[in-house]
Image (cartoon, rainbow, N blue to C red):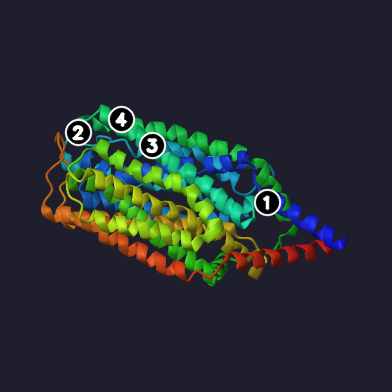
Amino acid sequence: MSDSTSDENTQKAQDSQKLDLKTKLAYGAGDLGPAITANISIFYLLIFFTNVAGIDIGLAGGVLIVGKIWDAINDPFVGVLTDKTKSRRWGRRLPWMLYGAIPFGIFFFLQWIVPRFSSNQDSNVWGLLGYYVVIGVISQTFYTVVNLPYTALTPELTQDYDERTSLNSFRFAFSIGGSILSLLLARELFSRVPNQEQQYIVYVVLAAICTVISVASLYWCVFGLRDRVLAFEAKRIQVEEPASIPFVEQLKIAFSNRPFLFVIGIYLCSWLGVQITASIIPFFVLYCMSLTNSDVATVLLAVQATALLMLFVWTALSKKLGKKIVYFLGMILWIIAASALYFLQPGQIGLMYLLAIMAGFGVSTAYLVPWSMIPDVIELDELQTGQRREGIFYSFMVFLQKLGLAFGLFLVSQALHTAGFQEVKPGQSTPPIQPESALLAIRIVVGPLAVICLIFGLILTYFYPITREMHAQILLQLQERRQRRESQ
């Protein structure tokens, strides 16, 4: 009888971790807004600064780096604050998303305005630099305010190992789907306005549409997850120890967690590969392949559409093969594609799209696998310390994502600047002809540099210690601890 009762309780516990479609859709929607704005910025902001605002590429890269460095710095602080937030109506994470959504959208849009500060071009450039630095810093602050609490929701929604992978597949389906939507809009708008001098309007309209979608999707997430989040909060308050650990001590504990070090290393390498590829692809298509802005959007669509479709394939395969093998399969295909891009020549359009599709296989695993590993690390930390600190772990994941973006932008902008890249001058109706040194730099970034990052990620993944069996043991020990507390 006792064994039967135990089995029934175990089954109920497992069922309670399952999420319905409505919850998964609401959770996925939370990444739609940040993903649209981040992807449009990654793909187009650097080339917008050079080809529309007329800023030297070295200075333009510096503007983006300042914003991203600040964005990375503020992550740990927001993470700790969300852990300490108390709200009976919204829980710990949702208030940040609720009140930060509209400012987030406004300041994203303001990045795509080109104000006029002086009739003198040199003076105006310095005014633009100051404007973009200030707007960029504020915009990245609100990006953290809405995105970091969102990323910390995963372990609060379910503790099931496979359900978390499924949940992340919904998240990145919305993320990549949002990117695809924005690229479709970009391609349509650029095809209607091929004149270089009028493309400023394209960027403004594109930014406005993405802003509206971003804010609406964040509210969908907040209201759609509220009941589930509050139910988790009620349980957490009952069982969690009231004593808190100082911030510096939290950092020490987080970085003494060996699996966490592997996860952040894997993610940094993967995301650096994503960032430098995304930043350089527009330059590669325009100058190495001699195509147009509309073609840039089409190539990026091929990558992102493949990544979206493969999310669910990789999710299913990970249940049979495990996360490590799935990561290896995707990365190897991406490495082959990146290596071949280095040798690609103008006119090889069909091969270019084939390589873009192959890269999409790897991009999909770069999104999915590291983020499905981090909740397992959080459980291990809870077992070791007795506290749940999702905010501190997720803040450093997002910190590394932004650090990777900043470093990637630095590499791309400085490589092109050193190689003599020519930005568009005011009044210039066609893109300038680039020197051979600049074309070579673009090829090196899109090929060998990306490959090096991905290989390091593969090495770290091979040695990642948490398996499905180990995770099951962690959850079992946590459950036994909670049962002891409840019986006292």
- Which mark's residue is nearer the viewer, 3 or 1? 1
Residues at marks 4 and 1 touching, judged by CB atoms closer than 8 Å = no
Q: Amino acid at mark 3?
A: Ser
| Quarter of image, res 220 | top right
Q: Is residue 310 left or right of residue 451?
A: right
Instruction: Check disc 1: other Cα within 10 Å, few if <14, some if 14-19, many if 20+.
Output: some
Identify the mark nearer the N-term, 2 or 4: 4
Q: Is residue 402 left or right of residue 392?
A: left
Image quarter of the C terminus: bottom right
Q: Is residue 34 left or right of residue 340?
A: right
Identify the mark nearer the N-term, 4 or 1: 1
Instruction: Check disc 4: other Cα within 10 Å, few if <14, some if 14-19, many if 20+.
Output: some
Instruction: Please tell me whether residue 20 is drawn above or below residue 374 in the rendered image.
Output: above
Residue under label 4: 189
Identify the mark nearer the N-term, 1 or 2: 1
Residues at marks 2 and 4 touching, judged by CB atoms closer than 8 Å = no
Q: Nearer the viewer, residue 93 or 114?
A: 93
| Residue 196: assigned label | 2
Q: Nearer the viewer, residue 248 or 60?
A: 60
Residue under label 1: 17
| Quarter of image, res 186 | top left
Identify the mark nearer the N-term, 3 or 1: 1
| Residue 283: assigned label | none
Q: Nearer the viewer, residue 463 or 353?
A: 353
Task: Name the element at disc 1.
Answer: loop
Residue under label 3: 182
Task: Name the element at disc 4.
Answer: helix
Q: Amino acid at mark 1?
A: Gln
